Image (spheres, helix red, strand yellow):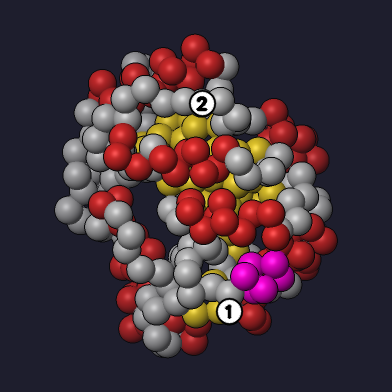
Amino acid sequence: MANSRIEWTDSTWNPVTGCTKVSPGCAHCYAERMAKRLQAMGQPSYANGFQVALQEHALNLPLAWKNPQMIFVNSMSDLFHENVPTDYIKKVFGVMRQADWHIFQVLTKRADRLEEISAKLSWPDNVWMGVSVENAAYRKRIDSLRVVPAAIRFLSIEPLIGPMGSIDLTGIDWVIVGGESGPGARPMEKSWVSEIQRQCSDSGVPFFFKQWGGVNKKKSGRMLDGKFFDEMPLAAREIVMAV
């Protein structure tokens, strides 16, 4: 188990590692930087750096984690990458179904493939499905997510690198927003964040503000208009109470 520094989850699980860039939000990928560091350190799972690799030895790890927790699936990859076979994705979903005391948070930028194969997957209630959307040009990913039969559907609007405009939040249960962090971080305008928060409030959708970002994200903080927004779907409260 890898404890997570990501504010909206508890742990990470990587049955797949490595990825390739598909849109502007990928430009300064933290996972790619991390993979190169781990490769230099001789970590076996990253022997090929950030090339897509199935980590079959990690498949059953969540079954050994007895404390209920929220688990971000593939923080170092994208489960719906074109180089990940559908049969392997089914295996990952099988483990998530078995480990029903956890909540699994799956996130993809490859919404087209998600929509294409979603009917072939078994969707247990403890699997939350999300798509990453970085600006208005990629809102179409939300339409693909909307047809997926997941118990919880969420948006990760991070890194937010441009205004989102009007968002159709029909069928969406949670929205996360955050600025880009690390080397080369692109700026995020307050008005972009405030507009998303307003739309979430008007639609009754929980809103989680992760960070302003920047080169020093800790210094930039994560308050919006003097308050923290840590809203989550009601289902998350059950796991917090169980721990």
Q: Residue 27: which quarter of the image? A: bottom left
- At label 2, which amino acid type do we have? Leu
Q: Where residue 61 sits: x, y (%)?
A: 70, 70
Report the residue at 39% width, 86% height from top: 48
Is 65 on the left or on the right of 205, as rendered? Answer: right
Q: In this view, does 162 lie above or below 141?
A: above
Return the residue nearer the eye: 186 or 218.
186
Question: Which residue is tagged 1?
Answer: 55
Which stretch did the figure color magenta?
Answer: 86-91
Mark before the other along the chain sequence, 2 or 1:
1
Confirm whether residue 5 shows in the render. Answer: no
Confirm whether residue 165 shows in the render. Answer: yes
Report the residue at 21% width, 48% height from top: 185
Q: Main secondary structure of the magenta part?
A: helix
Q: Where residue 56 sits: x, y (%)?
A: 64, 80
Question: Which residue is tagged 2?
Answer: 169
Return the residue nearer the eye: 18 or 13.
18
Q: In this view, does 18 lie above or below 45?
A: above
Assess whether residue 146 is covered by the magenta stretch.
no
Q: How crowded is mark 1: few (under 14 residues within 10 Å), some or many (20 or more)?
A: few
Q: State the quadrant of the N terminus.
A: bottom right
Q: Where residue 46 sits: x, y (%)?
A: 44, 81
Return the residue nearer the eye: 197 or 131.
131
Looking at the rendered structure, which numbered label has been put on residue 157? none
